[in-house]
Image (cartoon, rainbow, N blue to C red):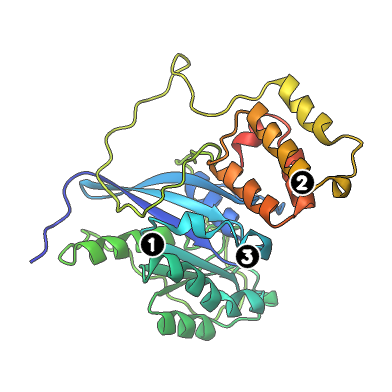
Amino acid sequence: MSVQPAKATYIFKVPVVGDGAVGKTSLIVRFTEGTFSETYKMTIGTSFAVKEIRFGSMAVKLQIWDLAGQPHFGGVRPLFYRGSTGIIYVFSVINRDSFTNITKWMEEVGKITGKLPGVLLGNKADLVDQRVVSVEEGQALADQLGIIYVETSAKEGQNVEDSFKLLSETIIRVRWPDWMPETPTPVPAVEEPSAPTTPTAGPTHAKPVGSTVGVTIEEEPTPPEEASPEPTQTSETPSTEPVMSPQSTGEVVLEFQGIDINSLSKEEFERRVLHTLQRLEITQNGVLGTYLRGLLEREEREVVLQTLRKIQNEHELDQF
């Protein structure tokens, strides 16, 4: 008989994957922050947030990784699959290609992690008049893949929190088969909608934390383990986040001002980019540094510049 989980806090690493613009970031923000923005903002590389869920005396801290779905980020994503505990796959019910590509996402993840507990989300379920993927198709794909299917709406908060709870419970039961929650989260019924659903208020008590900047990528997968209480950071506690001064911000612009980047050799362009990272105190082995180095290897200079231009101040840097 397996041992029941101890009364402790466990850390589960959960990447959220799927095509670009299916609503991955909106789902994470809705879950962790309880808000929704109508404005689409493409994820550059990756970002993460943390939220704790309690199951009786046991706490699970979800470390949720928001991975960019566009093809040109394909060389970076596998770095963040290592050490994952479960996966959330997302497609948009108004975009058939994003639905068809789910099997490709599972293959990409599986090459690094092997078979993991997962949940398939059919997002944007509130857009009833625009949907092109039926409930039956979504459920059939989930059954084929051996994972749970849930239809969600990040805009309305529909089934968002339950989706993350269901994944957490699935992970726990895989690790401790005898465990049963006091009140299991029911799998939301999925029925073909005939009219738009009524907006549902999302959670408002949680606040996302974390930044991708300066995060070290582990070389080997590590299983979740008991987490000791995190110290509360005060104004007197030194921050591990990189500090960017107004002067260095200006230097980022000057580094490439008036220069035709295509006229630079690969070595010179790389030297200027790495010099910029050094000025901003951004480690080359962190998430942002790793992402930029991947772009440099593929000679995607315009994307590199777009990323550097995005870093305009400390606030935007922290939101990466």
Q: Which mark is residue 86?
A: 1
Q: Nearer the viewer, mark 3 or mark 1?
A: 1
Q: Secondary structure at mark 1?
A: loop
Rendering coords of residue 297 (x, y %)? 67, 54
Identify residue type, mark 2. Gln
Q: Nearer the viewer, mark 2 or mark 3?
A: 2
Q: Locate residue 318: give its quadrant.
A: top right
Q: Which mark is residue 42?
A: none
Between the C-alphas of marks 1 and 2, the distance is 32 Å
Identify residue type, mark 3. Val
| Nearest to N terminus: mark 1 or mark 2 | 1
Eyeballing the image, is 240 above or below 156? above
Residue 201 seen in render: no
Q: Nearer the viewer, mark 1 or mark 2?
A: 2
Eyeballing the image, is 310 above or below 251? below
Q: Which residue is rendered at x = 56% and y = 35% of the image? A: 283
Rendering coords of residue 120 (x, y %)? 47, 71
Q: Residue furthest left?
A: 1
| Nearest to N terminus: mark 2 or mark 3 | 3
Number of numbered labels in the structure image: 3
Q: Which residue is rendered at x = 58% and y = 56% of the image? A: 76
Q: Which mark is residue 306?
A: 2
Rendering coords of residue 284 (x, y %)? 57, 39
Q: Secondary structure at mark 3?
A: loop
| Picture quarter with the C terminus | top right
Residue 179 seen in render: yes
- Say whether residue 59 is left or right of residue 317: left
Q: Nearer the viewer, residue 268 or 49?
A: 268
Identify residue type, mark 1. Gly
Report the residue marked by disc 3.
Answer: 22
- Say whether residue 11 is left or right of residue 218: left
